[in-house]
Amino acid sequence: MTTALTIVITLLLIAGAARMIHLLNAQHSERIALHHYSRFHPGGPGARSGPARPVPGQARRDHSEEPRTAPPAAPRHQEHGR
């Protein structure tokens, strides 16, 4: 009897959690639909038309001729007692 009751309660908890996740997902979808034209989407109010303009007074640097360097190695830790 207690095993059957435990199984029923577990299934009810799983069904309740699935329902809550479904409702939260629907709420999130509605929120996204309301903010369809945000600045992060292409063509939104914050989107730029064309390439970014350079800042006046600064020349663009060509990094293709600069030598590449490896990032510094992480320090090694020594074990004590050896």
Image (cartoon, rainbow, N blue to C red):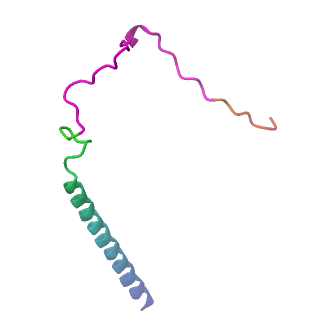
Q: Position of residue 1 (x, y in %)?
A: 42, 92
Q: What's the magenta bit mostly, secondary-structure-wise? A: loop
Q: Nearer the viewer, residue 44 or 65?
A: 44
Q: What segment is highlighted magenta in the picture? A: 46-74
Q: Residue at x 35, y 13 (%)?
A: 60
Q: Residue at x 39, y 87 (%)?
A: 4
Q: Nearer the viewer, residue 75 or 51?
A: 51
Q: Residue at x 35, y 78 (%)?
A: 11
Q: Position of residue 56 (x, y in %)?
A: 34, 17
Q: Residue furthest right?
A: 81
Q: Is residue 22 left or right of residue 7?
A: left
Q: Position of residue 68 (x, y in %)?
A: 47, 14
> Residue 66: within the magenta?
yes
Q: Position of residue 29 (x, y in %)?
A: 23, 59
> Residue 45: within the magenta?
no
* Position of 56 relative to 82 (above/below): above
Q: Nearer the viewer, residue 57 or 2?
A: 57
Q: Is residue 72 left or right of residue 10?
A: right
